[in-house]
Image (cartoon, rainbow, N blue to C red):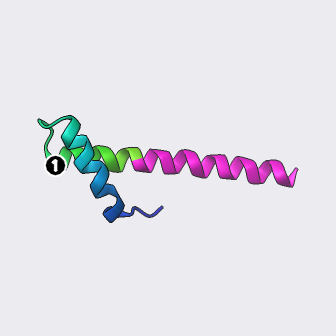
Amino acid sequence: MTQPSDSLDPWTDRLRTLSPDISREDARRFVQDLYQHAQTVRDQERSDADYEREE
């Protein structure tokens, strides 16, 4: 699973705008974790759909 670091920067900045007390590193980790979780869910959905098509 790849992580597009450049595309995470706007989300990190947006989170920091909403919560200025959060450090850049903490915001970045949160955005990365959220991205990874979303990718995992998406990959599982694709896998399930592929399995259903093969049945």
Q: Quadrant of residue 15?
A: top left
Asked whether, in this view, residue 32 is left or right of residue 23, the answer is: right
User: Where residue 8 sits: x, y (%)?
Assistant: 33, 56
Observer-nearest of 52 and 6: 6
Is 15 positioned to the left or the right of 36 in the image?
left
Viewer can see residue 43 = yes
Q: Name, please, the residue furthest toward the right.
A: 55
Q: In the image shown, does 53 or 16 lie closer to the viewer?
A: 16
Which is the main secondary structure of the residues drawn in magenta? helix
Relative to 50, 3 lies left or right: left
Q: Position of residue 44 (x, y in %)?
A: 62, 47
Horizontal relation, residue 30 to residue 34: left or right: left
Asked if the stretch drawn in magenta spans residue 42, the answer is yes
User: Pointer 1: what residue?
Assistant: 24
Q: Which residues are magenta?
A: 35-55
Q: Tell me the residue at 26%/49% (across/down).
A: 12
Residue drawn at x 27%, y 57% is: 9
Instruction: Name the residue rendered at 32%, 47% in the picture.
Output: 31
